[in-house]
Image (cartoon, coloured by chain):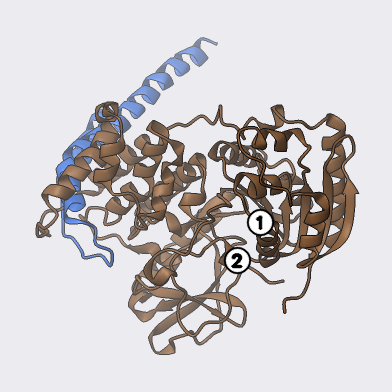
Chain colours: A brown, B blue
Amino acid sequence: MAPEIPQDQESPLGASFRDPSGFLFVSAGKLYRQVNLAYKENYDRLMDTGLYLALVNKGLLVPHVEADHPGLRPEIAYKILEPEFIRFISYPYEWGFSQLKDAALLTLQIQKLALEFGMSLKDSSAYNIQFHRGRPVLIDTLSFEIYPQGSPWVAYRQFCQHFLAPLTLMAYRDVRLNQLFKAHIDGLPLDLTGKILPFKTRFKLPLVMHIHLHALSQRRYSSAALDTTRTMSKVALLGLLDSLESGVKSLRWNPKGTEWADYYSDTNYTAEALEHKKLLVGEYLDRIHPSLAWDLGANVGVFSRLASERGIFTVAFDIDPAAVERNYIACKNRNETHLLPLVQDLSNPSPNLGWRSSERTSLIHRGPADAIMALALIHHLAISNNVPLESLAGFFRDLAKWLIIEFVPKSDSQVQRLLASREDIFSVYTQDNFERVFLTCFQIQRKSAIRDSERWLYLMEALPLG
Amino acid sequence: MELTSHFSTEVYRYIILTSSVLAYLDPGSGSFILQLILASLVGSLFVFKNFWKKLLSFVRGIFSRDRSDKE
């Protein structure tokens, strides 16, 4: 399966329409970026001054090669770039706190470096940052413009809305508030942010300036004409960046106390069962050799690492931001390049969003993966969320060719916990019925009882559609 | 002396101002104006912070030189 790049399209990709500098398109299964003639001067400056090399050498910008391709709109094309391939595109509403914070600090670092070369970021969208080889990188090569001496930072509003506002809400109110990104595609409105934040944030200089006063200024001057004769020195601009950086660095969130982040210290697995499960998952992975795996309900990534340490690029999804945070911190500390932890609520997966519902792609449309790992997951979807087994089988078949799935029977103490406070209406939730239903979508290739537990592990291969 | 002169230069550069441009994204009038309002404050803080850092490293340099001279 070749999952990550969309089909060839006769038009620019959905998110690539705002900037007249260029756009992304797909041709012959490859992703390209057309640089338009309108951006020629800026592109040449980026490449000729050494800024591009400096950014790439520091791992801040995704590298590209200039491709021998006529472009999707040759009449306005200056160059066609083939950027290094990003394995999985993720969005800020799927990131943990530190992922968003690292993306914010990266954006400021890039802006400071750009200014040294006489250029400046003309946008600072969080969607322009992606996680590549375990680190955040800027993916929009066309984000730079020649620094107009004396100009305030045109991307200041966007930086505050895309980074500072959500991070402050996550740090001071609730880490789940980055979900507001789904309702506000261009970042969190500062007036809304100000209303939600606690009063004490008015006593933190960067926060009072860049959020509270900023919201006030937006309200007061919303229809004011810009006086373009008034300017801002480069030192003041550097001061602004320094102040934003201090604000971002001062924000902290400590992942603790959630149900799932402490899962492995509060589980019904014996040590033998856990080790046997790891052994079986490893064996299944060795048998199918996927290149891209999605671990659904990955928690802190114990089983995801069985895949990523085999060189399989693995996206570790979990509903709990604390588990994702711990997983990401571990990835950073270990310099892991094949693992990407993300927040995802499988009962309500990320939808298509934005203009014509095509700027941000749904989770399902970012698939299929080669393999899905659904370990200790099915009982949560089937029992906590009342999803019928037929629907679960169809869901997994849509996501990947291979499925490694653990069946947790009703007698298991974890399932009993789920049933403790509700009526048991799940008479069909049996292992026999699970197999019967999943056989309508999959072939069972392997099936093993996990030692010292009541659970079973399956390796399934999707049946051809139709 | 060098530090004082650096400080004056930064303050001078901070006063020298030129023109502005239009962006493909709306920078927002309020966001634009706020930056102009904050410019003096954040610029001064930045210059002072850098001045302070240099002063500290200058003082540290003197003491470490004294120590190595004694050794």
Residue A388's mark? 1
In this view of the protein, which residue sits in the foreground, A259 or B55?
A259
Residue at the farthest bottom position: A75
Query: What is the distance, in whole Å, between disc 2 and disc 1 at their CAs?
Result: 37 Å
In this view of the protein, which residue sits in the foreground, A352 or A16?
A352
- Tell me which numbered mark, 2 or 1, is placed earlier along the sequence: 2
- Disc 2 to disc 1: CB gap under 8 Å: no
Query: In the structure shown, which secondary structural element does the residue marked by tag 1 occupy?
Result: loop
Q: Residue at x 41, y 65 (%)?
A: A46
Q: Amino acid at mark 2?
A: Phe
- Is residue A312 in view from this perspective? yes
Residue A5's mark? none
What residue sits right under mark 2 in the picture? A85
Vertical placement of residue A272 versus A457, above or below: above
Q: Residue at x 75, y 44 (%)?
A: A303
Where is residue A331 shown, x and y percent of the image? 64, 42
Is residue B66 toward the left or the right of residue A432 in the image? Answer: left
Answer with the quarter of the image where residue A42 lies. bottom left
Q: Amino acid at mark 1?
A: Pro
